Amino acid sequence: MLKTSAVMLGMFCVVALTTSVGRTQGPKNQAVDKNGAPMFKVDPFWPKPLPNRWSMQQVTGVGVDSMDHIWFVNRGAVAEGDEIGGGDNPPRIECCIRGPEIIELDQEGNVLNAWGGPGYHPQWPTAMQTVIPDSKGFVWISGTAPQDSIMKFTRDGKFVWDFGHRPPAEAGMMPENNQETSYLINKGRFQLDEMTNELYIIQQKRVLIYDATTGAYKRGWGGHGMPLSEISNEPIPNYKWTGAPPPPEKNFVPDLHFVEISKDRLVYIGERGQNRIEVFTTDGKFVKEFYVSPNTPGRGEGCGGLANTKMPPCGTTYKLAISRDPQQKYLYVADGTNNKVWILDRQSGNTLGSFGSNGRYAGMLHWINGIAMDSKGNIYTGEVEQAKRIQKFAPVLR
């Protein structure tokens, strides 16, 4: 465990305003714009610089624990030479070295715990994606590579449990099989339901639920609540983007990017390839669907990825944070294509507004891929590609 303090560095303070239609009451004492969307402002002095010359790397996942401590993935898989050259022998540069991949911050942005990375555990994920701190003091992590899995640690980094369900070595070359539940090619995007002690894993064109103690399979479903037996194993066709939304599709449309569970026991699943969020009961009954910036290209020709930054990415539903007020009135959707956080009314699915814009100054966003909210209403965002940072957006109070 590491405790440290550091000199605060700052950038420009940007007030994040909102636009669009609709009106609804915001959280208590939080200012809202003329359309009823909550307003936020970036804290340009948060967090404090990482200690020990650690470099900040891709922040693929962000989580908040019961003490309002912020946990984030500091994925170092694509570290640049000038970011870790200080670790050479002898050091080529004064700054920096590769840091741990799991980092805990307090509300002031100080590092409290930091651990993990290549070699930390024999089965440490090679493509880190998710971190979830639970209410019992454990931290769950996962990666997206075929042999990565979900792993459980104590908050100070002691290994506790491995979910397993790793595929055979040749599985990556096999055809897609949405009916297979004994092993999973990708376990990187998941959610922990502490109320029922279950893991919700989104993979291919389905959501699968497993016991979080034994790893036993329990149930699963596909798009619009279809049973696993009816899910197509063929690729979802690409479409030629002409400025319109994607064509209708009953199946889930990969890539599935988030699964979140609300207090009233609704399950929200984001389909980045369709700009869509589908809502279910925890038993898989389809409730409703709605779109986020639907006219954005969702998939197909003209879409780039992390390995192709010369082309813009596609899809809008990267990650989701549900507001922490008693009614959970809002959905905050991280959109790494438009570089915004969309603010939606949770009941109607209507878009009320947004904050953020493309850029690397404080308050701007560049390939946002993580989002979480604490009990005070602060929003934390994580960015990947070359932005490589975590930011804090505080509520604007009346």
Image: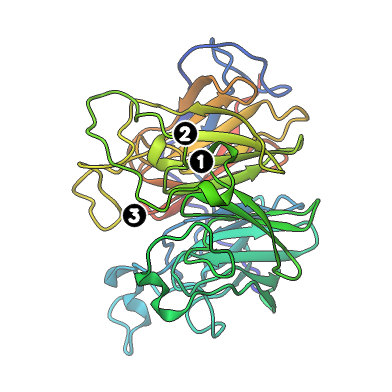
Residue 385, numbered label: 3
Q: Nearer the viewer, mark 3 or mark 1?
A: 1
Residue 276, numbered label: 2
Q: Residue 92 occupies which quadrant of the picture?
A: bottom left
Q: Report x, y in % for residue 228.
A: 56, 51
Mark 2 or mark 3, which is nearer the start of the sequence? Answer: 2
Mark 1 or mark 2, which is nearer the start of the sequence? Answer: 1
Which structural element holds mark 3?
loop
Quadrant of the image for the C terminus? top right
Cα–Cα span, label 2 and label 1: 6 Å
Q: Report x, y in % for residue 32.
A: 59, 17
The answer, for residue 46, to whether it is visible in the render is: no
Q: Report x, y in % for residue 74.
A: 48, 63
Task: Examine the rendered structure and indicate whether residue 50 appears above or below residue 367.
Answer: below
Q: Residue at x 68, y 72 (%)?
A: 153
Q: In the depicted view, which residue is nearer to us: 169 or 141?
A: 169
Q: Residues within 10 Å of mark 2 (few under 14, many from 20)?
A: many
Q: In the depicted view, which residue is nearer to us: 187 or 17?
A: 187
Q: Residues within 10 Å of mark 1 (few under 14, many from 20)?
A: many
Cα–Cα span, label 3 and label 1: 21 Å
Q: Amino acid at mark 1?
A: Gly
Per the image, the residue denoted by label 1 is 270
Residue 395, numbered label: none
The answer, for residue 96, to whether it is visible in the render is: yes
Mark 1 or mark 3, which is nearer the start of the sequence? Answer: 1
